[in-house]
Image (cartoon, rainbow, N blue to C red):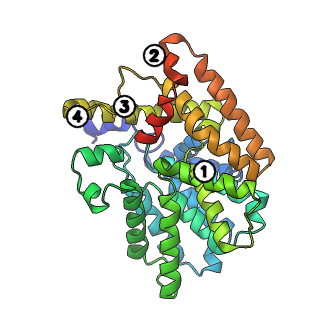
Amino acid sequence: GRSVRSFQSNLHSPHYSKHHTQATHHMLDQKYIGQAKCMLQKVGSWNFDIFLFERLSNGNSLVDLTFHLFSEYGLIKLFRLDLLKLRRFLVIVQEAYHSENPYHNALHAADVTQAMYCYLQEPQLSESLTSCDILLGLLAAATHDLDHPGVNQTFLINTNHYLASLYQNTSVLENHHWKSAVSLLRESGLLSHFPSEDRQCLETRLGSLILATDISRQNEYLSEFRTRLDRAELHMNNSQDRHFILQMALKCADICNPCRPWHLCKLWSHKVTEEFFNQGDIERRLNLDVSILCDRNSNSVAKIQIGFISFVVEPLFVEWARFSDTPLSHVMLGHMTSNKFNWTHLPQKDLRGTTQNNDSQWALKYILFL
Ligand SMILES: [Zn+2]
């Protein structure tokens, strides 16, 4: 028989997953797996609902989505990947994300991978990227926040976390995500049949992609992007330029939440704020200064989002749209504008302190915080 405790824990899991009889369980599983498969036919749609996909795939969205994209691109045959090793690799990647993090968990990785796929499909990229570029882009998206502790670099530095000293207070989290990705790759043996110089090159490029997601270095990447666009210096037949574009694509994919339709944008915004506020609560308990965006008494979801869109998201996506002037870029900018409008016009109780939003201090706060 089932104990009360297992019954209660079932209340918090998807209703179809556990407490049915074997027969119903099996039937429902088939039904949901069928629906998840069906959703994957629209994996290239910007409206793709990753939250629904997560439920239909029974919490395996990162594994199922990435596996699907690998086979759709023919990467398995092309790189002679072992199916079992690939699946095992994706499962250990998914499990290395912390499911208890409200935001930085495997679902965010799946969302970034889906967005990355949309960008890889854009003409500027799809017409020039090599299979190796695509393999790297998908791998980087799936692993870019691996083993994220749910707190930011400043917190790790202030609490003398070993990762902070290991990476000398520089891109601490991103270095850790990269090193974790490399160990899982090696552990899985997924690429063990590659010549060692190819494997080495792939690991280095993977690092360069993941390190580009360090938002505190956004201005460096953005000004280089801007300069090269101004001078028409980006040539997609040049491998270094393609790599730079992959970096920019991954950066966009990582912070594209405000460019999604409102119902998705809203869900992500609440999740990321919850993670910030959790950090603030810990800082308060430890008698540390509460980080600027983590104080639940002086911030709100809307206030944080308005600042984030104005100072981080908008500047990046405006340049991206210059590079890739496509219907998708226009759709993204359109969502971003209307989402910003929605946050600005929400009822006052959700907007504590918005009067300070045009303060140039905000830009600085973002750079310092993120
Ligand atoms: Zn991320």
Q: Residue furthest left?
A: 286
Quarter residue 49 falls in:
top right
Quickly name the residue at label 3: 294
Tag 2 near tag 4, CB within 8 Å: no
The residues tagged by marks 2 and 4 sit, at their Cα atoms, a distance apart of: 23 Å
Task: Let me know if residue 324 appears in the view.
Answer: yes
Q: In the image, is 14 to the left or to the right of 229?
A: left
Residue 255 versus residue 138: which sits nearer the camera?
255
Instruction: Say which of marks 2 and 1 sits in front.
Output: 1
Quickly name the residue at label 1: 222
Number of other residues with Cα within 10 Å of mark 1, as a class: few under 14, some 14 to 19, many 20 or more:
some
100 versus 240 height, above or below: above
The residues tagged by marks 2 and 3 sit, at their Cα atoms, a distance apart of: 14 Å
Ranked by sequence position, the earlier of labels 2 and 3 is: 3
Query: What amino acid is found at the position of numbered circle 3 in the picture?
Result: Cys
Query: What amino acid is found at the position of numbered circle 1 in the picture?
Result: Leu
